[in-house]
Image (cartoon, rainbow, N blue to C red):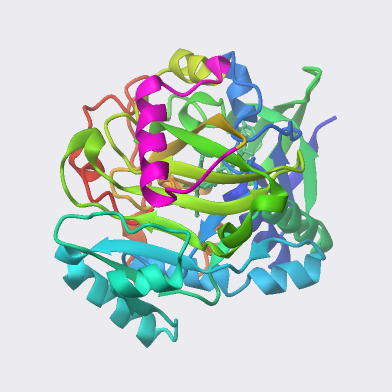
Amino acid sequence: MQDNVEIAVVGTGMFGSAAAKYLSRAGADVMVIGPVRHGGEGSGRGHEPAGLAHFAAHEDEARIVRQMGWDRFWGAVDSRSAGRLRDIETISGIDVFHECGALALMPTSLKGRSQAMLRASAADGIRVRRLSEADLRGEFPALAVPPLAGGTEGLWEREGAGYLNPRRLVEAQLALTVKEGGRVLRGAVTAVRRDAAAGRWRLRVADDEGQGQWIGAEKVLIAAGSLLNHSDALPGELALDLQVFTEPNLLYEVEGSRLGPLRDLPTVVTVDPEDTGNANLSHYLLPPVRYPDGKWYLRIGPGMQPAVRQLRTPQEIGNWYARRRITAEQSSLLARMMRLMVPGLAPVAVRESCCVVDKTPTRYPYIGHLDGDETLTVAVGGNGHGARGSDEIGRLASTVVLGQPWDLSLPRETFAPITAPRGRAGDSARPEYLKPPFGLC
Ligand SMILES: Cc1cc2nc3c(=O)[nH]c(=O)nc-3n(C[C@H](O)[C@H](O)[C@H](O)COP(=O)(O)OP(=O)(O)OC[C@H]3O[C@@H](n4cnc5c(N)ncnc54)[C@H](O)[C@@H]3O)c2cc1C
């Protein structure tokens, strides 16, 4: 027997869970579908293409939250979402947000951009302080100031910024979806088909044992994350221009009793505009975070240096996860950054972590109908920093699904999904938009 719903949301990730909450809140009959969580950070099981549906970019303990934005869109979604985190915690009863502040280290050569960010933040009531190199040394004694060409300055957002726990945010959004009357179905969608005779969509859902069932839906929202083109979640021959890149991290384990001044570290991003390949200093740094194994880790990740490789096929993606090792080039690049940023760090051990991120040519997420079909919508393309804005991205996606007015100052067309021939998606050489300064990630 087929279960029928008004709206099926494919993907119980950051965008899908937020969208499902807003759709349920609007009174729609919603089912959000995604595989059982498998724990391990970064990935589920990714050896064979079908297993790629288990990959989730939110399977980790910390994602940087900042309200100050690199541009109007990201500023708006990031600040609206951050402003709701405490409410989400209160209503769901699930702790999500750690308010340790966010620091952006900017080159003085981009001071026009920093000025614009400060102006936009002030207009939105977001308090950001501009710190000189001397201020930075005084304020953050455990942190060194990276030598950006022309000098370095800090944009310091103390309140409403820090990091969120992405696993728990998803858990909270799903709990709120259920509270609003929605349903959560555990399984991977293995086919999405239009049943023209019935005038509805049919989705095949396979559970962990491979048992399948069909779900009928009037509308479908696909929010299946970075590996969307490889995860059977798109109907027919559709594919998106969505490129997948390795996201290598190093995790530095520090003994809980010896954290000392490291406890006061904020989250940090460093923006280096110089086109110097792997010598480019852009990166992000998370302060010590306690992981489920009970240990404390500082985590560091890159910008989009050439060492950050593109993954074009399901085989390449599967191999990246199967190896469970980042490349020697990635490892030495990240270790060099960590030495530069926290010179006195004496880790007990250093772990590697393999994840992936997706990039769109617009650098914005795709939030819109596919193939001109108002019953088929997509929300994907976090561009490596979609977690902090995910609540608002989910809300925007819900308005598109429901045919409600678009209420963002940027036109809706800016987020229209760009399709690409299947098998060719992401074929282009390293594009211009991945060159430094990469945007604030
Ligand atoms: C190492 C790393 C560090 C990051 N750091 C930050 C940060 O500091 N700040 C920040 O804001 N963002 C950060 N991000 C990005 C952020 O995590 C992503 O942008 C965000 O998770 C995107 O949400 P999503 O819903 O598109 O994808 P996901 O959260 O990955 O969710 C997609 C979901 O779809 C499911 N799915 C896939 N295929 C199917 C299918 N066929 N059927 C059913 N379900 C399916 C998957 O299982 C998954 O649960 C980081 C990402 C990585 C990897």
| Residue range (magenta) | 322-347
Q: Position of residue 128 (x, y in %)?
A: 40, 79
Going 59% across and 34% down the picture, which residue do you hit?
Answer: 42
Image quadrant where residue 306 sits: top left
Going 67% across and 32% down the picture, which residue do you hit?
Answer: 203
Task: Return the residue nearer the eye: 432 or 342.
Answer: 342
Ligand 1's image quarter is top right
Image quadrant where residue 99 sits: bottom right
Image quadrant where residue 223 sits: top right
- Which quarter of the image is occupied by the N terminus? top right
Q: Does the magenta run of residues contain 340?
A: yes
> What is the magenta segment's predominant secondary structure?
helix
Q: Position of residue 438 (x, y in %)?
A: 27, 49
Tell me: residue 7, above or below residue 196: below
189 left or right of 119 in image: right
Tell me: residue 64, above or below residue 77: above
Residue 324 seen in the figure: yes
Tell me: residue 333, above or below residue 346: above
Going 40% across and 43% down the picture, which residue do you hit?
Answer: 339
Q: Position of residue 28 (x, y in %)?
A: 71, 60
